[in-house]
Image (cartoon, rainbow, N blue to C red):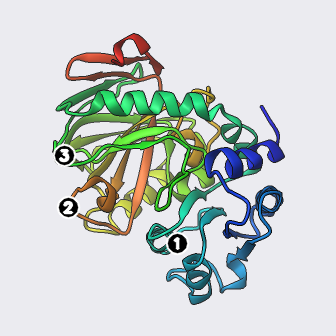
Amino acid sequence: MGSLEQGARNAVTVCMGVKPGERVVLVTDRLVPTVGDALERAARNVTPHVTRVTLEDLGPRPLTTLPEALSKAASEADVTFWATQSVKGELPMRMAFRRLVQQRARHGHMPGVTPLLMETGMCANYDEVADLTLRLHKFVQGKRTARVTNPVGTDFTVEFNPEWRWLADTGKFHTPKTWGNLPAGETYTAPFRLHGRIVTHLLGDHFSEKYGELKTPLSFEVRDSWIDMDSFRGATPEIVREFKEYLLSDPNGPRAAEFACGTNTGLTRLVGNLLQDEKIPGVHVAFGHPYSDLTGAPWTANTHVDVVILKTDVWFDGIQVQREGQYLMQNLR
């Protein structure tokens, strides 16, 4: 475990590669001010051109539309960071910000970040993370199917569309118009078809901050890419009710939208925060928006919620690449 300052330096210099003279826009909030402070100090040690925007100064949260002041600041940036807590209802605004900055800047996306994440996932060896991520990304090209199981009952299959893209989230974003989550480490795409049972210990979006790691895992069935809304078992009635309400708040909310393998080898346990926990070696699946501008999947949604699956065995076209969440490096050729 490292320090908050080390994680901030890693974010600024290793992951985003900020250079002297570049213009940095740092979006923070009053819920995690120490993270914003550390990132600002790290950025100012490299360049004097740092603008910090605090969301609460722009209006009451949740902010559902992108404020003009934030749009203006971001449109002139070379590097941007989004280092805030996730607030229910702000996903469309965050997506609008990302689309804006992606037109020219490099972007580090950190919704839900905490000091703990800065001290753990952001202190990973990102040379090692990038190497595994790119090896896996190369391996999955052209693969048509995957199967995922784990000891607590997960068992599902995925079919891939060869025209939809796989993305490599290496944690290094050094060229214009590139972006990714920090902490980083995953290879992902949108599934063409997903069918079977998922058992998860962590839900994404605002659920991870509210409930953390689930004491009793939640299981459900996915049939032809759509969650069977009557199949939920486990967790608590409150969690199930809120999760179902979230999924049903958009017509495509219950649709499988992302299939990903975590590749951050510096992570060994859940901390109850999706931003980091989805990067742990294993699998996560999301429902709702498929990052269509990146993957090529032809639908959209105003929701995107991940579920993290631990200790996974994973096969692509019959070749095993994970055993209980550990990569079989000899098979990644």
Work out whether 64 lies above or below 176.
below
The N terminus - image quarter: top right
Q: Secondary structure at mark 3?
A: loop
Q: Secondary structure at mark 1?
A: loop
- Whether residue 281 appears in this view of the structure is no
Q: Name the foreground residue: 75 vs 144.
A: 75
Q: Position of residue 269 (x, y in %)?
A: 62, 29
Q: Quadrant of residue 251?
A: bottom left
The tag earlier along the polypeptide, 1 or 3, is: 1
**Which residue does the numbered mark 2 point to in the structure image?**
298
Tags 3 and 2 touching, CB below 8 Å: no
**Which residue does the numbered mark 1 point to in the structure image?**
90
The tag earlier along the polypeptide, 2 or 1, is: 1
Q: Amino acid at mark 3?
A: Phe
In this rendering, would 108 be left or right of 296? right
Q: Amino acid at mark 1?
A: Glu
Q: Position of residue 44 (x, y in %)?
A: 81, 62
Q: Neighbour class for label 2 at 10 Å: few (<14), some, many (≥20)?
A: few
Q: Position of residue 105 (x, y in %)?
A: 53, 66
The tag earlier along the polypeptide, 3 or 2, is: 3
What is the CA distance from the residue labelled 2 to the residue labelled 1?
Answer: 23 Å
What is the CA distance from the residue labelled 3 to the residue labelled 2?
Answer: 10 Å
In this rendering, would 175 be left or right of 269? left
